């Protein structure tokens, strides 16, 4: 199936205007891209963990979700709620109580806090039980909903309100949790990492694959946040592109344990270019903190080498 | 009070009704679309966080300023510089 933008924008809009997300937020773009990859005739059940997306897309009595069922759950349990819905659906279908000719797909959205920290137990459980669901994490790298507190997905040396940069500490002192790798180790049939890159082909194709693969699948999406990261709202596409080009956020997918890097920059852009756009890394450009940038670069290079190696190894095994 | 007129608690019985809630007053600048420069590549349509850029049969119709929050993402992704942000 070729990706033609003119046809894609004609598809059913399942997330409508009038939501209360900040200007320039990436999350609505991600949600639309994921839901657009559904076939138009199929139904969808969406469950959203408490996050920016949830609190600003269904403020009573308004809802922005259209052509799909929507369940708001607590912070912890987007994955377990959806597991229950999926199990009920299967049971009703088996006993013939539900006569529906079209397929129903189950999609959960969560922020990084609701996925990596608070919702992790429910997510891990759902993947272990093997429900036929897709979990999409839009990773904006901190608890943006409550005012930029650190989460375990916050990158190394980022300045947040609970990991402030100052004389004593240079921002967050710990490294981030590599959520995509953790989900690969759950033996999921399809795990991918994507971003809003170029004409959105990458996110569209990966969402389609994730939604129409049997079993629990996981998507980790890079979601820039102009408020929390401190960059201009219009730079959404630019900052996503830089994250991919510097290999800060590699685009790759893992299908049944086989790695595939979807984009390999011919020449890696130094991570400095990505960092200097954002206020949360401003302190790294002081003279005494310069060595921290090198440290970040080393971590990125190490991860990139690891991915290249995994791609080589897992593809060799196939032959 | 007539009990029949009270909806079930904690549920929204319609879908997509946030269209009634206009967010256009948030902006302090607005996008201006030039039909001459526009090549209808549709790059801005999926990138708009509000989903307020309208197109019909592959032709861009313009922005719904009732919802536009003035973020300027569309102006920056446009490869032909057909969208310009203007101060109100």
Image (cartoon, grey):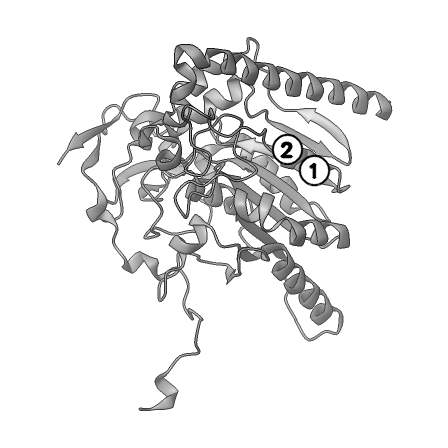
Label 1 CA crowd tier, 10 Å (few <14, some 14–19, many 20+): few
Check the residue under mark 1 and report the chain it is in.
Answer: A
Instruction: For mark 1, give the secondary structure.
Output: helix
- Circle number at residue A178: 2
- Residue found at x 76% / y 51%: A128
- Circle number at residue B43: none
Position of A106 with respect to A129 (left or right) is left
Quarter of the figure with residue B59? top left
Q: Residue furthest front?
A: A168
- Residue found at x 43% / y 49%: A52
The answer, for residue A102, to whether it is visible in the render is no
Q: Position of residue A116 (x, y in %)?
A: 60, 43
- Residue found at x 61% / y 47%: A135
Question: Which quadrant does the C terminus of chain A fall into?
Answer: top right
Q: Position of residue A236 (x, y in %)?
A: 39, 30
Q: Do the residues labelled 2 and 1 touch (CB within 8 Å)?
A: yes
Q: Which of these two is toward me, B7 or A278?
A: A278
Position of B81 with respect to A184 (left or right) is left
Q: Which of these two is toward me, B40 or A185?
A: A185
Instruction: For mark 2, give the secondary structure.
Output: loop
Q: Position of residue A118 (x, y in %)?
A: 58, 50
Q: Would you name the residue on which mark 1 appears?
A: A182
Q: Position of residue B62 (x, y in %)?
A: 26, 39
């Amino acid at each position: 199936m070729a990706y033609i933008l003119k046809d894609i924008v004609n598809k059913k809009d399942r997330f409508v205007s009038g939501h209360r997300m900040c200007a320039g937020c990436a999350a609505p773009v991600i949600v639309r891209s994921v839901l657009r990859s559904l076939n138009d005739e199929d139904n969808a059940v969406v469950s959203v963990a408490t996050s920016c997306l949830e609190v600003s897309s269904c403020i009573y009595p308004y809802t922005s979700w259209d052509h799909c069922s929507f369940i708001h759950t607590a912070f912890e349990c987007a994955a377990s709620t959806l597991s229950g819905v999926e199990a009920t659906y299967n049971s009703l279908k088996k006993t013939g109580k539900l006569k529906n000719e079209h397929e129903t797909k189950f999609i959960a959205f969560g922020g990084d806090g609701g996925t990596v920290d608070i919702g992790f137990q429910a997510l891990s459980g759902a993947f272990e039980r093997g429900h036929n669901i897709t979990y999409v994490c839009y990773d904006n790298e901190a608890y943006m909903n409550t005012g930029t507190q650190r989460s375990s997905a916050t990158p190394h040396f980022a300045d947040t309100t609970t990991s402030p940069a100052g004389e004593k500490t240079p921002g967050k002192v710990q490294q981030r949790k590599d959520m995509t790798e953790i989900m690969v180790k759950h033996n999921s049939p399809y795990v991918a990492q994507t971003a809003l890159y170029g004409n959105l082909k990458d996110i569209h194709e990966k969402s389609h694959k994730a939604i129409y693969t049997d079993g629990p699948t996981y998507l980790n999406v890079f979601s820039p946040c102009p408020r929390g990261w401190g960059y201009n709202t219009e730079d959404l596409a630019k900052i996503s592109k830089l994250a991919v080009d510097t290999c800060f956020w590699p685009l790759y997918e893992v299908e049944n344990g086989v790695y595939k890097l979807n984009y390999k920059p011919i020449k890696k852009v130094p991570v400095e270019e990505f960092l200097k756009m954002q206020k949360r890394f401003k302190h790294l450009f002081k003279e005494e903190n310069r060595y921290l940038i090198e440290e970040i670069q080393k971590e990125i290079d190490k991860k990139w080498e690891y991915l290249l190696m995994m791609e080589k190894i897992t593809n060799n095994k196939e032959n | 009070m007539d009990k029949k007129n009270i909806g079930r608690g904690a549920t929204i019985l319609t879908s997509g009704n946030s269209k009634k809630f206009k967010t256009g007053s948030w902006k302090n600048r607005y996008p201006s679309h030039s039909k001459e420069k526009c090549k209808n590549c549709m790059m801005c349509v999926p990138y708009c966080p509000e989903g307020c850029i309208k197109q019909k049969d592959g032709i861009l119709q313009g922005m719904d300023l009732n919802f536009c929050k003035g973020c300027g993402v569309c102006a920056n992704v446009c490869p032909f510089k057909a969208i310009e942000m203007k101060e109100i």
